Image: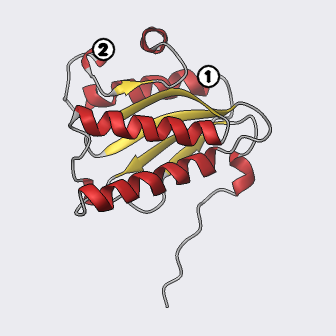
Amino acid sequence: MIIEKRHRLDMVCYKGMVRASFTLCIKDRKPVFTREDIVQNFTGIFEKCIRKYSCFNWIYLFMPDHFHFILEGKNLDANLWKATVLFKQKTGYWFSKNTPCIQWQKDFFDYVHRKESDLKEHVSYILDNPVRKEIVKNRQDYCYKGSVDLDLDCIVDAG
């Protein structure tokens, strides 16, 4: 019998007015987020999931084989973990119906922000990801990024 490993942090770490960075990876690093229609569809699903669990989105960025985002709880009822799991469930179902050879890697990577400076560092890290991977020369040139709650220009200038 195989026992699946529990997520590394206790669920209480994701509840309330906390902020965290997340990275969700595609299994076997298959490129899927290379088409505008898929990214737009997943962005719409993402917005519904974070709204359901009272999350504020600082930034999101779709790389070809993974997805970065930063969420923050809007109130004491917010739940960043549940919003992320719901997004993976809904988009996993979409994969099964539209691209059955693509699926999410189990679990996800995250970092719960402990201080205000973590936000700027993580926004910069996310925005520079396409530059580090040599997809674009300047972070402003990458098209699959944004925020559900903020003006993208403010995010790019802040990073």
Image-based side of 144 in relation to 34, left or right: right
Instruction: Kindly state the secondary structure of the residue where label 2 is placed.
Output: helix
Tell me if residue 23 can be seen. Answer: yes
Tell me if residue 63 can be seen. Answer: no
At 51% from the left and 35% from the top, the residue drawn is: 47
Three-letter code for the amino acid on which mark 2 is drawn: Gln
- Distance, label 2 to label 1, CA atoms, is 22 Å
Residue 138: image x %, image y %?
25, 16
Q: Which residue is mark 2?
A: 140
For the C terminus, the image quarter is top left
Residue positioned most to the right: 76
Using the image, determine if residue 60 lies above or below residue 107: above
At 50% from the left and 25% from the top, the residue drawn is: 148
Three-letter code for the amino acid on which mark 1 is drawn: Ser
Q: Residues within 10 Å of mark 1 (few under 14, many from 20)?
A: few
At 61% from the left and 22% from the top, the residue drawn is: 117
Foreground disc of the pair 2, 1: 2
Which badge, 2 or 1, is on the more N-terminal residue?
1
Q: Which residue is mark 1?
A: 117
User: How many numbered discs sit on the rendered protein?
Assistant: 2
The quadrant in which residue 43 appears is: top left
Q: Residues within 10 Å of mark 2 (few under 14, many from 20)?
A: some
Image-based side of 152 in relation to 63, left or right: right
Residue positioned most to the bottom: 1
Residue 152: image x %, image y %?
44, 15
